[in-house]
Amino acid sequence: MLKKRLSKWIPTPGRLRQHRSLRIFGSWTEETRLWHLSRHGAAKAFAIGLYCAMLPIPGQMFIAVAMAIIFTANLPLSFALIFVTNPLTMPAIFYGAYKLGAWLIGTQPIEVKFEASWTWFTQSLDEIWVPLVIGSQVLGVICAVLGYLLVDTLWREAIRRQWRARQRRRHQ
């Protein structure tokens, strides 16, 4: 059941191959294990995708695809999960990561008056980058571990339920 739900949600190999920017990985993305949806591959993909989604840098998709190839995780799921951070969620996630980083290193967070402009970003980055990077890394690791454990647990439980249902049908 979980496998069917995930299969509907993740991009197809054809859709991912259409991304010109992913062509740099060449034939590495053709590995069949990267496209197979299994418990281990999906759990690793959740860890990779959620970790990369928390990175406050451009190019999250390259990192997610490279890590999926290295760790033989489900490639389309790793790729899709980076979009947890999107224009709607990014300000809240990165502000939370900044506050977490400031708390971890023991500094007082500056009062951020957000302005959607390149000038604001370049001027503010000097003051906020260290807490932002530290907070994002910690948040990424936490999300990766929780994502891995959640998917692995849900997948195991779904298999147990299917097995019990099969046993009940046999004994009727």
Image (cartoon, grey):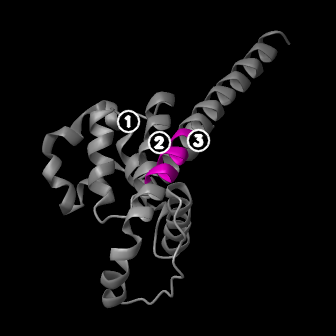
Local secondary structure at mark 1: loop
Q: Is residue 24 magenta?
A: no
Vertical side of 172 occupied by 96: above or below: below
Q: Amino acid at mark 1?
A: Ala
Contact? badges 1 and 3 (CB < 8 Å): no
Q: Residue at x 14, y 52 (%)?
A: 24
Structural distance between the alpha carbons of marks 1 and 3: 16 Å
Kindly report the secondary structure that dominates the magenta region of the rendered protein: helix
Q: Quadrant of the C terminus?
A: top right
Q: Is residue 171 above or below residue 126?
A: above
Residue 144 located left or right of residue 126: right
Left or right of residue 88, residue 24 in this image:
left
Q: Which residue is mark 3?
A: 146
- State the separation of the CA atoms marked 2 and 3: 8 Å
Disc 1 or disc 2, which is closer to the eye?
2
Q: Residue at x 65, y 25 (%)?
A: 159
Q: Quadrant of the N terminus?
A: top right
Q: Which mark is residue 47?
A: 2
Q: Which residue is mark 1?
A: 73
How far is mark 1 from mark 2, CA to CA?
9 Å
> Which class describes the residues within 10 Å of circle 3: few (<14), some (14-19), or many (20+)?
some
Question: Magenta part of the protein: which range?
Answer: 137-145
Q: Residues within 10 Å of mark 2 (few under 14, many from 20)?
A: many
Write the residue at 27% across / 35% down: 70
In the structure shown, which secondary structural element does the residue marked by tag 3 occupy? helix
**Residue sitting at the far top:** 171
Q: Observer-nearest residue: 141 or 166?
A: 141
Circle 2: residue type: Ala
Please report whichever mark, 1 or 2, sits nearer to the chain's N-terminal start: 2
Residue 53: image tag:
none
Along the line of sight, which residue is nearer the eye, 36 or 145?
145
What amino acid is found at the position of numbered circle 3 in the picture? Answer: Leu
